[in-house]
Image (spheres, helix red, strand yellow):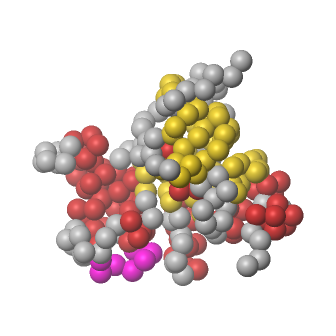
Amino acid sequence: MTIMFKKPTRVPHDGDPRNARVRFTGLHAGYPGRPVLHQLSADIPSLAMTALVGPNGSGKSTLLGVVAGVIDATSGQLRYAEGHPPAFVPQRGAVGDALPLTARQTVEMGRWGERGPWRRLTRQDRTVVDSAMERLGVADLASRQLGELSGGQRQRVLIAQGLAQQSDLLLLDEPTTGLDPEARQRISALLTGLVADGTTVVQATHDLEAARSADACLLLSEGRLVGQGSPARVLTPESLSRIWQPA
């Protein structure tokens, strides 16, 4: 029997945590008057890189937002294996240039979930921030204004903010879009290193090269899941030609 929920249930996933970090079943989501996701069911494997792939408007960012907990689904089930709450890294364009924030202040915001925005950071918080910035190679940018940074530098700062949340589930929305090849390669290598160190990484991406190097892939079209599994099996010329129709 299928049970539909007005709001998705969020309960620990009782399967083998090595197999699925997140599982969603019959997921529907969208915005007032505009449904986006329709009846999505899939697993996001633990300790792996999963790519969400699809054209603009396919629902990648909405699905990422639902898994992150910043967008409410309208029905379905969403289950997490035991672990920390997800850390969400938005698109660079979602962070305004006009905000008077330094790179370090931006990374420190990753501690707000633990500390709150108005409490002073502890010595442990500062150590976590230092470690995240060093890991992403942005420690030397600490005093620079966020709006002054290059696209690749800003993206690494935002990923450092996600890392400062000390989650084992990192969600990224288009982390390499608009970057030059060297910056894309550097960020891809950093994300691969995070997976090797025990972090489950999910990225929404238009970059088919990055998607093909992932461990798993979810292919979306018009808010529906049209393929899931290994990139070699999902990202075939036939499947891609079906969803990316020429203008």
Q: Is residue 82 left or right of residue 162?
A: right
Measuring 34% from the left and 51% from the top, which residue is drawn there?
A: 164
Give, as a single range, the part of the protein colored magenta.
Answer: 147-153
For residue 17, what is the image quadrant?
Answer: top right
Asked if residue 180 is positioned above or below residue 186 in the image, the reply reads below
Q: Is residue 60 left or right of residue 243?
A: left
Q: Is residue 156 left or right of residue 37?
A: left
Can residue 177 be seen at all in this image of the molecule? yes
Residue 217 image offset from top left, x and y in percent = 70, 52
Q: 83 or 234, which is in the foreground?
A: 234
For residue 56, what is the image quadrant?
Answer: bottom right
User: Residue 37: within the magenta?
Assistant: no
Residue 233 image offset from top left, x and y in percent = 83, 54
Q: Give the quadrant of the C terminus.
A: bottom right
Q: Count of labels shown?
A: 0
Q: Give the quadrant of the N terminus.
A: top right
From the image, give the main secondary structure of the stretch colored magenta. helix
